[in-house]
Image: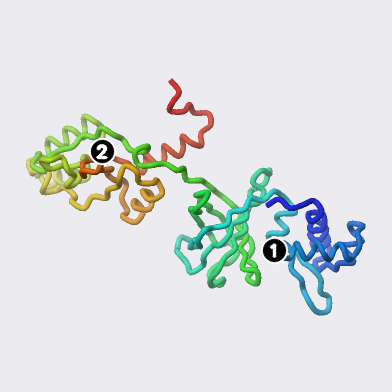
């Protein structure tokens, strides 16, 4: 969030005086500090209040205090992400009834650990200093943020988080992630034959297709191991295969694929074409490798000969 120099000067004065005196700052003090008239300072403060950077404290000893966001803006650069729809906040590994409306990223280009101010709705008692939080992916930037809560401002419904990791999920389709030209087996194939294929090709699972080439199941190394322990390697694939196979289309987005894997607690999905035939397989390792490659600037691109 870039703000005009005239506003930044007043904001910085408020932050510095407040940090030094540990009390609300009056407009007169600010005017003396920056060498401007009290009227000019009040006009600027009105703008800062509207931006959520400063708030007024009334009564004896009243004045102005910087918000969490105001303090962080005074100390460094801020990037702003307004959400199209609220995102549920994950606290200490559990979904909550707190929803994030806005994210203000601060100090992204600085030498210190970046922070993010979360503007939230919902019950604030669910979060305290030291809580571990996860938010995202956001709709526009597809950012997933993990970090530790360092301050909670219930009156302004703001949470300051020390960012420990932040990743933007790329806009990729299943066809760009999958391993294509997959081998397949029929339901009547013996498990011994499948075991030979798995060992020879160094793979962990094979799609099972019917006579028309449509996906009807999946057989994995785990199934083979179970059959081996039972002395049943002569059994057919149909006796051990999983019939409820998580599938995605060629145009499925990586975010939806990741959610499907998480919801189904599986490590792979089969990509099917319009006829329902296997076109490829995507594993968690495929996704991890793709994202690692995207953020490894020393690695050559796929197009490099």
Left or right, 55 with respect to 252, comes to right
Percent coordinates x, y for residue 217 in the rendering? 18, 47
Mark 2 or mark 1: name the one nearer the start of the chain.
1
Question: What is the basis of the colouring in this image?
Answer: rainbow
Few, some or many residues within 10 Å of mark 1 (<14, 14–19, 20+): some
Residue 279's tag is 2
Residue at left 16%, top 47%? Answer: 216
Left or right, 126 with respect to 274, comes to right
Q: Secondary structure at mark 1?
A: loop
Few, some or many residues within 10 Å of mark 2 (<14, 14–19, 20+): many
Image quadrant where residue 204 sits: top left
Q: Secondary structure at mark 2?
A: strand
Residue 122's tag is none
Percent coordinates x, y for residue 206 in the rendering? 21, 39
Which residue is the site of mark 1?
52
Residue that protrudes farthest toward the top in the picture? 305
Residue at left 81%, top 74%? Answer: 62
Image quadrant where residue 174 sits: top left
The Cα atoms of the two marked residues, 2 and 1, are separated by 51 Å
């Amino acid at each position: 969030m870039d703000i005009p120099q005239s506003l930044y000067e007043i904001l910085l004065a408020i932050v510095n005086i407040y940090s030094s005196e540990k009390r609300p700052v009056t407009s007169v003090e600010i005017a003396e500090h920056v060498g401007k008239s009290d009227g000019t300072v009040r006009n600027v403060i009105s703008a800062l209040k509207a931006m959520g950077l400063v708030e007024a404290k009334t009564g004896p000893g009243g004045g102005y205090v910087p918000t969490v966001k105001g303090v962080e803006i005074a100390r460094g650069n801020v990037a702003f992400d307004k959400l199209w729809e609220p995102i549920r906040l994950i606290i200490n590994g559990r979904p909550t009834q707190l929803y994030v409306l806005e994210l203000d990223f601060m100090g992204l280009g600085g030498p210190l650990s970046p922070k993010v101010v979360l503007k939230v709705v919902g019950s604030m008692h669910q979060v305290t200093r030291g809580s571990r939080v996860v938010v995202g992916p956001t709709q526009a930037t597809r950012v997933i943020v993990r970090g530790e809560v360092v301050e909670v401002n219930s009156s302004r419904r703001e949470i300051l988080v020390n960012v420990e990791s932040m990743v933007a999920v790329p806009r990729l389709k299943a066809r760009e992630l999958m391993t294509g030209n997959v081998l397949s087996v029929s339901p009547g194939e013996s498990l011994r034959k499948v075991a030979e294929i798995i060992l020879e090709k160094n793979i962990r699972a094979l799609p099972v297709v019917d006579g028309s080439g449509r996906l009807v199941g999946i057989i994995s190394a785990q199934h083979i191991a179970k059959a081996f322990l039972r002395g049943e390697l002569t059994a057919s694939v149909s006796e051990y295969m999983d019939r409820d196979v998580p599938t995605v289309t060629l145009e499925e987005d990586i975010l939806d694929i990741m959610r499907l894997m998480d919801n189904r607690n599986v490590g792979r999905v089969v990509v099917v074409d319009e006829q329902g035939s296997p076109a490829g397989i995507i594993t968690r390792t495929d996704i991890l490798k793709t994202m690692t490659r995207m953020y490894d600037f020393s690695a050559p691109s796929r197009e490099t000969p």
